[in-house]
Amino acid sequence: MELVSKLKKRSSEGNPIRIGIVGCGQMGSGLAHTINNIEGMRVTAIADIAVERGIQTYTEMGHSTDEIVVTDSIGKAQDAIKAGKVVVTPDAFQMPVLESLESLVEVTGVPDVGARIAYDSIMNRKPIIMLNVETDITIGVYLDRLARKMGSVYTVASGDEPGVCKMLYEQAILMGFEVVTLGKGKNNIINLEATPESCEEEAASKDMNPKMLAAFKDGTKTMVEMAAVSNATGLVPDVPGMHGPKVEVDDLLKVFIPAADGGLFSKSGVVDYSTGAIAPGVFAVVRSYDTRIRKEMKFITLADGPYYLHFRPYHLCDLETPQSIAEAVLLGEVTVTASAMHAEVVCTAKRNLMPGDRLGGIGGRDWYGKIMTYPDARSHKAVPIGIGANAVVRNPIQKGAIITENDVTLDDSTFVYKLRRLQDAM
């Protein structure tokens, strides 16, 4: 691909890739610092409702206050960029129309914001790289098809689990293997009781948003990540919520295989996760019955087969995202997108819910996400997590029950809701 040489050429020509970042929390600010150390890339604009985050990030990266322009005016932002300055804006929705930006990275984690940013970026033929996987699992199929139709690029970022799992998947297929399992490590056991309030102290110590930490602890984020993997590859969860056993790396080949061969799963071709020392790694369990391939693997790895482990002991989140930016802008390539809806993450009651209750969003106190196969979710009329926020409860819902469209009135005013209905109609 020669991405580095292409970026160096852009740098030598005084024409670095001009990047806008939407959302400047822990991930967004980390991404900005990473890009700041890459020749041939430049963070030109940051959007965050708390403009002080963007200002602080630029200051930490070495920009003087004279170089930083804070504005919610598209015209002033455009003039500032042309003058060689950098922009901080509280208005994320102006970013896709800034002509001086070559690509956007969406890092808010809010499905409705992600939906609008992605849609407008595509319509302006501006490559959009998503660290907002919550949006992707809700309307990624629609956005991918729209981008291809418009001659733009829509992609989930490398570095997050879906990106690195897709990398392992494609490598395995291109070596002639069947992919039996794609999985990730989770560094803690799921706590379905986690709320922003229970996570507040730990979140403060880690400089995290308490809702984001709660979404990790209650398992929603793991479900989201593996649903994105499922929709990109066609592999599916074996059971609702996946199994999630605690398994050491050396035992993955004994457990993450079909039950017919002594493992856990009812079939081959699944997504799942494991807690413990595997985190923060990702893995693929692959299989081959070809005698020549098995002979080669025995010679190279000493493994007997037919099952083999491809293990990457890390994923580096926003640190790896610039590769997706470079591939999208320089090559017009995607890292991972949803080919079809194979899995859904649905709202599951975190507490007893009563008529009149208005539901919060991801990482809140009302529900957590559970992965299911898409046909199963549709048959239950289960509410996807991307459109669950602000729903009003009509019928009592017991703790642990799947929240269905029969039980709530969804907020149909949001942009993500409208795009989801367009996707459902496709």
Image: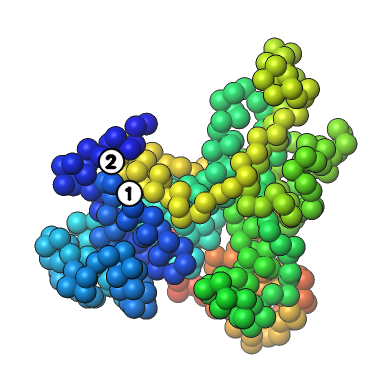
Q: Position of residue 192 (x, y in %)?
A: 73, 70
User: Who is closer to the viewer here, 236 or 383?
Assistant: 236
Distance from the alpha carbon under mark 2 to that under mark 1: 9 Å
Tell me the residue at 52%/46% (across/down).
Answer: 163
Disc number at residue 7?
2
Q: Is residue 310 left or right of residue 302?
A: left
* 308 to 216, vertically: above or below: above
Mark 2 Cα shell of 10 Å, populated few (<14), some (14-19), many (≥20): many
Badge 2 vs badge 1, beta-carbon distance below 8 Å:
yes
Task: Please count the marks in the image.
Answer: 2
Tell me the residue at 74%/55% (across/down).
Answer: 276
| Residue type (three-letter) at the residue carrying disc 1 | Ile
* 366 to 335, vertically: above or below: below
Q: Residue furthest bottom?
A: 356
Please state, as top left, top right, bottom left or bottom right, where the N terminus lies in the image. Answer: top left
Residue 120, located in which quarter of the rendered image?
A: bottom left
Tell me the residue at 72%/52% (across/down).
Answer: 277
Disc number at residue 38?
1
Secondary structure state at the residue bearing disc 1: loop
